[in-house]
Amino acid sequence: MGGTFDPIHNGHLVAASEVAHRFSLDEVIFVPTGRPWQKLGDHEAPDAGHGARDVSPAEDRYLMTVIATASNPRFSVSRVDIDREGDTYTVDTLRDLRTIHPTADLYFITGADALDSILSWQDWEELFGLANFVGVSRPGYELHAKHLATHLEALPPNTLQMLEIPALAISSTECRVRAARGRPVWYLVPDGVVQYIAKRKLYRAPKASSPGVS
Ligand code: ATP
Ligand code: MG
């Protein structure tokens, strides 16, 4: 399961847990993006979560993902995207995971919103040959593959499967905005992630600088 995970939240964890159960997966590997090309501003830096934004440092996103998944023996975190130079494209993620796990049956988990934009992803024609895809429901988005139908016709059945999961209307954007405004993120993200956000002062709104003071 790829994501920016800025921060990882319970919606991600429920999606992973449901797909693992339904497809009898041995493991779910969370892959935090290095530089998410669709989301980056000019710098990797904390922000208040509004509009076009900068993304938190990769190591913070990686550590939050480790903290959130540590207690589940079937969850792990991969650094392939963080350690690769340049922008992150899912096609590279899947190629790297295939190299690391040459005999595995790979499934890529993606929410309904991400599935909508899949045709804009780099080398998307190759994606369906590298893994099976599982599209999961997400509140506020329609789960469908109408835009993919003609592309899937030539591929084996079950290359893309859809799964309704328990609805959690949580987004990382909302968590960042809450943290920036001093509102609670308890129970939206795992406890350890709440504490990590506070400890590293992530998502704090930048202080307005007074004239003459640097
Ligand atoms: P942001 O608001 O910063 O875009 P996000 O909550 O969408 O964050 P991402 O890291 O962008 O989280 O998402 C990673 C993957 O998890 C995507 O495939 C996304 O569709 C899926 N996902 C995120 N939140 C949910 C949710 N509440 N329910 C189902 N899937 C989700
Ligand atoms: Mg998103």
Image: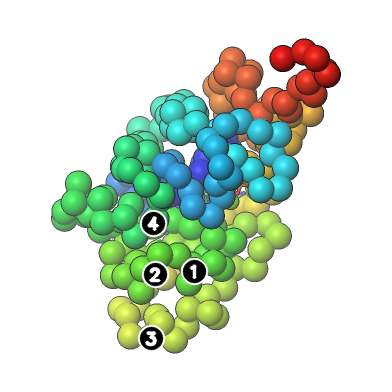
Q: Are marks 1 and 2 in contact (CB under 8 Å)?
A: yes
Query: Badge 3, how many Cα within 10 Å: few under 14, some, many 20+?
Result: few
**Residue found 51% across the figure and 44% down from its top:** 4
Q: Are marks 4 and 3 in contact (CB under 8 Å)?
A: no
Q: Say which label, 3 or 1, has the lower sequence index.
A: 1
Most extreme residue toward the left is: 103
Mark on residue 120? 1
Q: Say which label, 2 or 4, has the lower sequence index.
A: 4
Q: CA distance from mark 4 to mark 1?
A: 11 Å
Mark on residue 90? 4
- Kind of residue at disc 2: Trp
**Residue found 31% across the figure and 55% down from its top:** 92
**Residue found 66% across the figure and 48% down from its top:** 52
Query: Badge 2, how many Cα within 10 Å: few under 14, some, many 20+?
Result: some
Q: Say which label, 2 or 3, has the lower sequence index.
A: 2
Q: CA distance from mark 4 to mark 3?
A: 22 Å
- Kind of residue at disc 1: Ser
- Kind of residue at disc 3: Glu
* Residue under label 2: 124
Q: Measured along the vertical axis of the image, is residue 24 above or below residue 186?
A: below
Most extreme residue toward the right is: 211
* Residue under label 3: 153
Q: SS class of the residue under badge 1?
A: helix
- Kind of residue at disc 4: Thr
